[in-house]
């Protein structure tokens, strides 16, 4: 079933699928109360400050898929531990290894290992998710695994996925590979213990995706997310991070390669709840055709959370008359000894740089491609694993407008980053 | 950080915390007979105000229309401010000194008590008192709901400049008022603008004819005196083609334990090649150290660069009021128009500020610049909220925004909420924001050179504000600089 | 056939006339220096020759190797062998120096009908040339000019010249912002490029650079045209007496020397 306006009726949807939803009576009760709450508030509208630039109801009705510029992202070369979710259901459960314990949410709920109760949230979309989530990944990391863990989403149906990742020790690299053509509502909860690190690389190349990532960083844990939106009609990636221990470090980076009528919204809120925590939030948007880019970043520094370093940077490169960009980098500061700053810049390709390249013999199309790729090197550089970075660089490069002119050179460039 | 530095910081912070409303030197009241409307707001009160002012029928209709719309509107709650609900039926919407009952007279006939009040405030209403060597400034003095006098009218009239109270303008220049009133801030623009449109009592009116460079600075001095009275003035400045005017605005109020509402509307219209500089030093009573009393300053200020190459520049120094909610804005409608906003907002004790600007780029080749300096001390909260919006047809729009916050002490808060929206490829928008504190090193350096902590803080804060201070007319800059020091008195560290 | 032939060139930026009947001919193998005070139009000349947007000739001809230069796109000029060492080299974030050099060289080689250079030979060639310019591996890996010092940027410009091997190199105020050691390195790099097949145009305000790069001809440029030409001795003379006489001549018409210059 394709996403259509009638699917906005979550109650009807719930009634048709609730018998197939995993979990016992207690879970079902939690689902019903979440649904009641979700239905009461409905889909968030633009009057909701957090959705000011994204008209969800309108975008969800938009059914014509944005033309595909290049292939979906393929991380198989890295041989990750892969979990494939098709139409909202895990199709096979991989074995973990010494450091990784993997279970499906459906399994965990059915066996009573998780009860879903008390998982409420004040986030409207998360309430829909709680009510309707059929499956997801439940992963515990205890030590640094050899392989990355990939969550691959595909299919044409609506999907509500709920992933829970707990990193007790070591560093885990997660790949969220979002290829589903339908509507996906995903919630990803990450908890990172002191000394551990979660590195997330997310690529959305299709569909209507509304995702919420909630992260708790205990002690000096670290979280780094790098999200690339290369296709799809709607991308809403919302990240909430709580920095709860001294030395915690959060990175939230995004890149949008907007074309067609894509609408990509990167929203984040970083709560520095304690002293000596650092964060860096960036967005690099390249907007072609009638694409729309949104950056909403909020940094909150709590009372007495001194010596916090929190930086936000949003940069957009406009390639078309019809492209739109909106940015709202917000600071809310309650401590006085902090280094907080944000910057936002927006403009066309730099004409001087273009001339400089052309004066060295590079034709205009290749020069443009080179500048755009250079612009996107910054988010790529935040991918720690070199092989993964090269893999993402190849995917990104194929989506840079004008790549047919000089793909190879720029591939190399991106991989160098 | 070393012990010594921490010590200095602590001391500074404590000093700031000790500072209370008693430093507010304009807190006296004037004992003067007033003619007041009964408390409450309804159509009859509006008719009463309109009748008091002898207004034409169209203006009464306009007010009643605004009132009707206001009743359907909700008080905004999105700002970063928190105050008890205002009972709009428990306010007085009109108060005027009895002696002014028959309308403005020549300055010679103004009640001497009123003149003494303005003298105490440092505002000369006697033209001969203008000192040699100082540039002439024409003053319109607004006391509670009415204008008590305007200076240098004859000299201005020779240049063709109209500078008078709003009430007089309605009588003597009804066509101009009717043409421009509400053309920048419509009646239903927002809750407080609608309220003002219904009940505004007086204010200033300025018209600069084509090609005229106004021969002196114009200024309005607002004073709230009566207790439990709202002030709702309305200012309209029109700069016709190729003209120039610099306009200053100052405000004070007595110290009172209850809060008072000030909901003003300022509309600026700049036609082709005209330029308006509008400067405000807002020093309404901020309330005492425990947050008792003070003015609620809910103001709508907007300028319309209506035709090509018009320029509007807002400069504000905001040190007073318990709660401030104001966003002086520019509509850059004409091609090649320029909008500027320079702001210093200081909050201390329990003051709350939510202020900023909007730059709406509609015409081609428009540019705007925003420099905002927010200083928070005590337990205050200080928010910058600004919007830069480039519409699809606004080719080659440029904006630069610099938005800095300085925190003094660890009980205050600073927020920055910019909205940056571009719908045109050729827009180049830059936004920078920083948050900082006065460092122990800076304080130590100043003190080692002989400055006491207060002087040092004033010096550092003035340095922090320099980009904005230098945009004020000279007369105001000096006053503003002192005000920066006074507002943070006892707080340096 | 002359390498570069500029005839009666007139040009302006934003309605302001900057070049007023500029003439200059450079043969292969020659090094010419143009000296002039600030605002004389030196940088406009270099941008116009390289084809920067907004710099249009209103009148006159420029022939490069026999072809009409003004009709060519900037990259076509580079392929034809025109190289401008920028006074203020651009910083390009995200594009490493090495990638930039390889992309530019291969573009130029393709344009000249040559094969692209294989990666191994390219690496060898760049390493060799960068060593000579004191450009280390780290500088090659960093994004183009980002965070480079003034001296590093200028060395990098000369390295690009060495890699692209142009027919005509224009050095626009290449000495500005360089200390004496950096100047020596840059000049050595430029001198190593001197050959019978290559022309050079050195644009400078000061004579200092010409102590290191000895020109065959020196021209004085004032108000958009050459007011006097001579040999290297002219540079020394200017160092002693300054541009005052020429400036006065343009505005007030004083001094015999200027009359001679026109002759």
Image: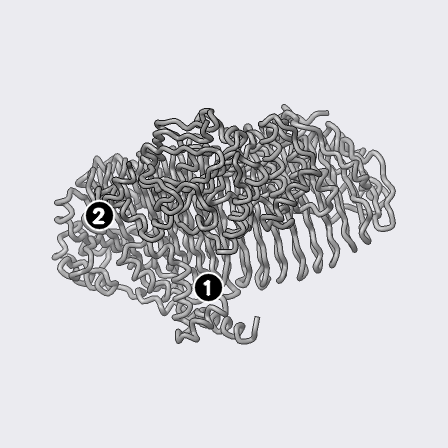
**For mark 2, what is the residue?**
B165
Q: Is residue C260 left or right of residue C155?
A: left
Quadrant in the rendering for residue A106: top right
Question: To which chain does the residue with label 1 belong?
Answer: B
Depth check, front residue: B287 or B260:
B287
Identified at 13% across, 53% down, the residue is B106
Question: To which chain does the residue with label 2 belong?
Answer: B
Q: Are marks 2 and 1 in contact (CB under 8 Å)?
A: no
Label 2 vs label 1, nearer the camera: 1
Q: Position of residue A409 (x, y in %)?
A: 65, 34
Depth check, front residue: C242 or A77:
C242
Q: Position of residue A148 (x, y in %)?
A: 78, 44
Q: Is residue A308 above or below residue B340?
A: below
Locate the N terminus of chain B and report the quarter of the image it occupies: bottom right
> SS at mark 1?
loop
Give residue B392's mark: none
Q: Is residue B399 visible?
A: yes
**For mark 1, what is the residue?**
B377
Q: Is disc 1 on the same chain as disc 2?
A: yes
In this figure, which colouring scheme has been used for the structure?
one colour
Depth check, front residue: B87 or B209:
B209
Q: Position of residue C62 (x, y in %)?
A: 41, 28
Q: Is residue C25 above or below residue B98?
A: above
Q: Is residue A185 visible?
A: no
Depth check, front residue: A245 or A21:
A245
């Amino acid at each position: 079933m394709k996403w259509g306006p009638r699917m906005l009726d979550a109650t009807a949807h719930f009634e048709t699928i609730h018998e197939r939803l995993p979990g016992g009576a207690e879970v079902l009760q939690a689902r019903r109360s979440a649904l009641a709450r979700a239905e009461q508030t409905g889909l968030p509208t633009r009057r909701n400050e957090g959705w000011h630039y994204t008209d969800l109801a309108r975008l969800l009705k938009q059914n014509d898929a944005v033309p595909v510029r290049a292939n979906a992202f393929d991380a198989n070369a890295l041989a990750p531990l892969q979990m494939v979710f098709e139409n909202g259901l895990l199709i096979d459960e991989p074995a973990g290894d010494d450091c990784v314990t993997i279970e499906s949410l459906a399994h965990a709920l059915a066996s009573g290992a998780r009860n879903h109760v008390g998982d409420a949230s004040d986030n409207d979309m998360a309430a829909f998710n709680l009510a309707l989530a059929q499956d997801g990944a439940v992963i515990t990391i205890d030590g640094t695994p050899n392989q990355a863990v990939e969550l691959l989403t595909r299919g044409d149906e609506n999907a509500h996925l709920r992933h829970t990742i707990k990193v007790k020790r070591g560093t885990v690299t997660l790949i969220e590979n979002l290829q589903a053509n339908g509507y996906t509502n995903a919630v990803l909860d990450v908890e990172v213990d002191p000394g551990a690190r979660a590195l997330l690389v997310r690529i959305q190349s299709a569909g209507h995706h509304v995702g919420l990532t909630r992260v708790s960083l205990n002690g000096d844990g670290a979280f780094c997310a790098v999200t690339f939106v290369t296709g799809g009609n709607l991308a809403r990636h919302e990240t909430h991070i709580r920095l709860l221990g001294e030395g915690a470090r959060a990175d939230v980076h995004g890149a949008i390669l907007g074309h067609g009528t894509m609408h990509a919204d990167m929203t984040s809120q970083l709560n520095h709840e304690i002293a000596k925590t650092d964060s860096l939030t960036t967005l690099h948007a390249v907007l072609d055709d009638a694409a729309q880019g949104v950056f909403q970043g909020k940094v909150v520094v709590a009372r007495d959370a001194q010596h916090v370093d929190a930086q936000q940077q949003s940069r957009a490169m406009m390639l078309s008359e019809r492209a739109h960009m909106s940015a709202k980098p917000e600071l809310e500061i309650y401590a006085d000894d902090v280094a907080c700053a944000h910057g936002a810049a927006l403009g066309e390709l730099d004409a001087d740089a273009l001339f400089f390249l052309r004066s060295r013999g590079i034709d205009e199309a290749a020069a443009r491609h080179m500048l755009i790729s250079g612009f996107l090197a910054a988010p790529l550089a935040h991918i720690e694993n070199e092989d993964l970075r090269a893999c993402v660089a190849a995917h990104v490069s194929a989506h840079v407008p004008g790549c047919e002119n000089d793909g190879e050179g720029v591939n190399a460039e991106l991989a160098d980053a | 950080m070393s012990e010594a530095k921490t010590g200095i910081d602590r001391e500074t912070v404590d000093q700031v915390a000790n500072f209370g409303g008693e430093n507010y030197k304009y807190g006296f009241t004037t004992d003067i007979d007033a003619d007041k409307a009964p408390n409450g707001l309804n159509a009859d009160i509006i008719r009463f105000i309109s009748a008091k002012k002898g207004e034409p029928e169209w203006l009464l209709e306009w007010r009643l229309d605004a009132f009707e719309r206001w009743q359907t509107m909700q008080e905004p709650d999105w700002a970063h401010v928190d105050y008890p609900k205002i009972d709009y039926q428990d306010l007085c919407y009109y108060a005027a000194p009895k002696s002014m009952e028959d309308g403005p007279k020549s300055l010679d006939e103004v009640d001497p008590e009123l003149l003494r009040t303005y003298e105490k405030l440092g505002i000369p209403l006697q033209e001969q008192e203008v000192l040699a060597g100082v540039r002439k400034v024409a003053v319109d003095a607004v006391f509670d709901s009415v204008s008590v006098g305007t200076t240098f009218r004859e000299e201005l009239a020779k240049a063709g400049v109209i500078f008078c109270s709003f009430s007089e303008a309605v009588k003597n220049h009804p066509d101009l008022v009717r043409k421009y009133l509400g053309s920048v801030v419509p009646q239903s623009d927002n809750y407080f603008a609608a309220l003002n449109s219904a009940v505004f009592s007086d204010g200033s009116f300025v018209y600069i004819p084509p090609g005229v460079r106004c021969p002196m600075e114009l200024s309005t001095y607002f004073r709230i005196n009566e207790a439990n009275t709202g002030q709702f003035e309305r200012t309209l400045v029109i700069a016709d083609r190729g003209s120039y005017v610099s306009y200053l605005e100052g405000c004070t109020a007595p110290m009172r334990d209850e809060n008072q509402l000030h909901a003003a509307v300022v509309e600026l219209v700049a036609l082709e090649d005209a330029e308006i500089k509008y400067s405000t030093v807002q020093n309404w009573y901020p309330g005492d150290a425990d947050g008792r009393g003070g003015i609620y300053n809910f103001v709508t200020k907007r300028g319309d660069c209506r035709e090509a190459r018009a320029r509007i520049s807002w400069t504000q120094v905001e040190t007073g009021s318990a709660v401030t909610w104001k966003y002086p804005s520019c509509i850059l409608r004409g091609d090649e128009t320029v909008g500027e906003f320079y702001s210093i907002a200081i909050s201390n004790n329990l003051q709350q500020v939510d202020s900023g600007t909007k730059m709406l780029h509609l015409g081609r080749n428009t540019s705007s610049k925003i420099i905002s300096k927010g200083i928070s001390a005590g337990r205050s909260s200080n928010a910058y909220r600004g919007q830069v919006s480039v519409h699809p047809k606004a080719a080659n729009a440029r904006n630069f925004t610099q938005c800095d916050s300085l925190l003094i002490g660890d009980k205050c808060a600073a927020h920055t909420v910019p909205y940056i929206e571009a719908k045109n490829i050729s827009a180049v928008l830059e936004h920078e924001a920083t948050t900082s504190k006065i460092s122990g090193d800076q304080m130590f350096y100043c003190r080692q050179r002989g400055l006491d902590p207060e002087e040092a803080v004033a010096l550092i804060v003035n340095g922090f504000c320099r980009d904005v201070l230098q945009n004020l007319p000279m007369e105001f800059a000096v006053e503003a600089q002192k005000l920066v020091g006074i507002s943070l008195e006892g707080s340096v560290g | 056939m002359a390498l570069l032939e500029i005839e009666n060139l007139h040009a302006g930026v934003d309605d302001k006339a900057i070049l007023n009947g500029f003439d200059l001919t450079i043969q292969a193998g020659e090094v010419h220096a143009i000296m002039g005070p600030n605002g004389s139009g030196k940088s406009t000349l270099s941008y116009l020759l390289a084809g920067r947007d907004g710099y249009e000739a209103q009148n006159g001809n420029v022939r490069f190797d026999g072809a009409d230069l003004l009709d060519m796109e900037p990259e076509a000029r580079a392929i034809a062998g025109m190289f401008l060492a920028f006074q203020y080299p651009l910083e390009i974030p995200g594009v490493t120096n090495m990638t930039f050099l390889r992309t530019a060289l291969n573009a130029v080689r393709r344009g000249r009908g040559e094969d692209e250079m294989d990666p191994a030979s390219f690496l060898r060639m760049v390493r060799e040339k960068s060593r000579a310019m004191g450009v280390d591996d780290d500088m090659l890996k960093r994004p183009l000019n980002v965070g480079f010092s003034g001296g590093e940027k200028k060395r990098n410009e000369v390295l690009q010249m060495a890699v692209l091997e142009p027919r005509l190199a224009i050095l626009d105020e290449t000495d500005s912002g360089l200390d004496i050691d950096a100047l020596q390195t840059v000049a050595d790099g430029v001198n190593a490029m001197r050959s019978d097949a290559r022309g050079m145009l050195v644009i400078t305000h000061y004579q200092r650079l010409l102590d290191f790069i000895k020109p065959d001809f020196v021209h004085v440029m004032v108000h958009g045209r050459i007011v006097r030409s001579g040999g290297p001795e002219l540079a020394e003379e200017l160092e002693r007496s300054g541009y005052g006489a020429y400036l006065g001549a343009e505005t007030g018409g004083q001094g015999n020397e200027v009359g001679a210059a026109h002759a």
